[in-house]
Amino acid sequence: MRCLREKLRQANLTLQTNYTEPTVNYQQRGGTAGTAWLQHWEIRLNPVLLQENQQAFIDEVVPHELAHLLVYARFGRVAPHGKEWRWMMESVLQVPAKRTHRFAVQSVQGKTFTYLCDCQRHELTIRRHNRVLRGETEYRCRRCGKILRYDVRNSI
């Protein structure tokens, strides 16, 4: 929270604005470190990844998500990691504009299901697997273009 408040103060001074502190909750799940909920002025953080990567999380994820909120407040809907976001990160918040984290996510990954095509194995999340089972969608390999088929040998 200290980092968030400091970066927000810095942005308000630089931009000559008075943006309020966003709501922060710790309900982000899976391998995603954080998300910015633009219309709600809210940042959602992954508590497990925060605990496992405290300093990097504070230095990178918090400013990254705050920048999304600030860009939305200043420019409206724009490309998520476009020139406005890069400007906000580098010029206003003075943080390198990195789009993705490099945290180990093994501890937060859910069960995956093996699917096959003609050229490789694919690991689908339980959400995608269930969509296939319900007949809602099918997935294709980006390399060979074949429809993925469930590998029942690895279903145990």
Image (tube, helix red, strand yellow):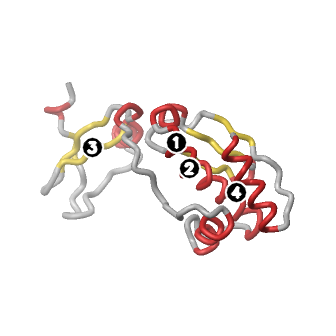
First in sequence: mark 4 vs mark 3: 4
At 55% from the left edge and 66% from the top edge, which residue is drawn? 81
Residue 122 coordinates in the image, percent (x, y): 24, 48
Q: Are marks 1 and 2 in contact (CB under 8 Å)?
A: yes
How far, Cα to Cα, is label 1 from label 3?
30 Å
How far, Cα to Cα, is label 2 from label 4?
17 Å
Q: Which residue is mark 1?
A: 55
Q: Which residue is mark 4?
A: 69
Q: Amino acid at mark 4?
A: Leu
**Mark 4 element type:** helix
Is residue 139 placed above or below 44 in the rendered structure?
below
How far, Cα to Cα, is label 3 from label 2?
31 Å
Q: Which residue is mark 2?
A: 59
Location of residue 9 (image quadrant): bottom right
**Mark 3 element type:** strand
Q: Are marks 4 and 3 in contact (CB under 8 Å)?
A: no
Residue 126 coordinates in the image, percent (x, y): 37, 36
How far, Cα to Cα, is label 1 from label 2?
6 Å
**Mark 2 element type:** helix
Where is the C terminus found, in terms of image quarters?
Answer: top left
Residue 140 coordinates in the image, percent (x, y): 28, 57
At 61% from the left edge and 67% from the top edge, which residue is drawn? 85
